[in-house]
Image (cartoon, rainbow, N blue to C red):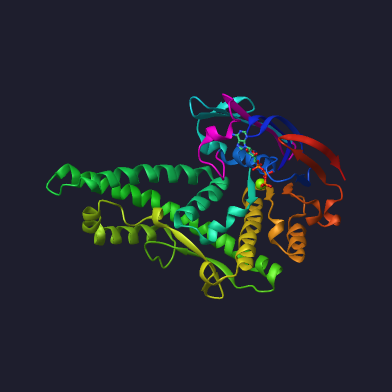
Amino acid sequence: MIIENLALYNYRNYSLLNLKFNKKLNIIIGNNGEGKTNILESIYVLAITKSFRDSECENLISFNEPNGIIKCKLNKNSQKTELKIEFYKDKRNKKIYINDKQIKTYNDYLTNLNVILFSQNDMDIIRGAPSIKRKYLNVEIGQMSNKYLSLVNEYNKYLKQRNDLLKKYDDKNESNKILLEILTSKLIEKGSLIYVYRNDFITNINSKIGKIYQFFTGLSNLKIKYINSITFDNYELSFIREEMMKKFNRIMSKEIIQGSTLIGPHRDDFIFDLDSNDLSLFGSQGQQRLAIISLKLAEIELLKESTGHNPVVLLDDIFSELDKVRRNKLLDFINKNIQTIITTTDIKSINKKYIKNSKIVTIKNGNIYKEEVE
Ligand SMILES: Nc1ncnc2c1ncn2[C@@H]1O[C@H](COP(=O)(O)OP(=O)(O)OP(=O)(O)O)[C@@H](O)[C@H]1O
Ligand SMILES: [Mg+2]
């Protein structure tokens, strides 16, 4: 898929921006603080409906303005779609439109524009708390499947009800007992499917990530290990359900004492395993960075396979951390009919041979200073 153009109105430090993109490589140059990441962020927001750096949508609106708009024209196999999100500061909310028609359920929207973002924050996927890793899984699987996102929403709704009940649980109260049974079976029904989705995603990533990591480093034993609050011998739905039920029966009294649901996909985690070592504990900074890059490249392939389209790739200033050889390898990997938007403070960080035919945009203080095609 290709973003043909992007329009911003009162978004961060852009009062008005209209930017046409090249089908392949686009390079956004500018000094610190001029607005490079803001452009990538706006594209990410159009795809995911939330920013990767701020959870409050009103912060995306320019200072002292009541509302802001992000808009793009998307081209998928020559089929054109206009996506638009409008943010309102006073109501602290947003409205989403496809071809000027308002969309009420966000889950149906998220599979339209697929993006893979590479940014400095990515290291959190290795080193961060399990909640960050679960968020990552939700965003990425959600780009491929709107059914998955509705499952997660439903699961979270039942989880909250079950936790509320556990906090005030009275075992002499018959209706408490019945309600707990119902909510437990709902968590098993929805949770088991979430396990299957996540395990499928990780299995698919593992079928690719080893050889990609090898392409960068010469070593091939990188994989992702999925870690659950229940040990599953396999991820067959009926088996998962049975194991969840058994474990709930064993720990229910503990859950009542603690007033909280102790097992389920809301406790999931994963680690990067390099030669049987946890990369977050034993990996060098460079190894961790290349593991993340391999993960994201594996995702590009996976998205292409599952949706039939290449995602749009966003690289936010990550070249400064890579040596020349790795930079070129990364660009070699992406450079096949994938629309890519790169930000950098220094064009020299990109090898001339990739710059040919690319679009170069220089940004100064929220304005286009120069626009050229090499
Ligand atoms: N809501 C907002 N309204 C107006 N300006 C904003 C808003 N939020 C952020 N900014 C401004 O946007 C600028 C930062 O933009 P951005 O993060 O895109 O910079 P950058 O070019 O990526 O810089 P760096 O090279 O340091 O990463 C800052 O000057 C900041 O004050
Ligand atoms: Mg930046």
Q: Is residue 195 magenta?
A: no
Q: Write down the quadrant of residue 326 in the picture.
A: bottom right
Q: Which residues are magenta?
A: 50-78
Q: Name the one closer to the observer, 340 or 108.
A: 340
Residue at image coords 54%, 50%: 141
Residue at image coords 53%, 35%: 57
Q: Is any part of residue 197 visible from this angle? A: no
**x and y, in percent, of residue 261 in the image:** 30, 53
**x and y, in percent, of residue 344 in the image:** 74, 50
Placement of the C terminus among the 4 image quadrants: top right
Placement of the N terminus among the 4 image quadrants: top right
**x and y, in percent, of residue 103 in the image:** 55, 29
In the rendered view, would you say 9 is above or below 132?
A: above
Q: Write down the quadrant of residue 323 in the picture.
A: bottom right
Q: Name the one closer to the observer, 351 or 245.
A: 351
Residue at image coords 71%, 68%: 215
Q: Is residue 52 magenta?
A: yes
Q: Is any part of residue 302 visible from this angle? A: yes
Q: Quadrant of ligand 1?
A: top right
Q: Name the one closer to the observer, 130 or 213.
A: 130
**x and y, in percent, of residue 325 in the image:** 76, 66
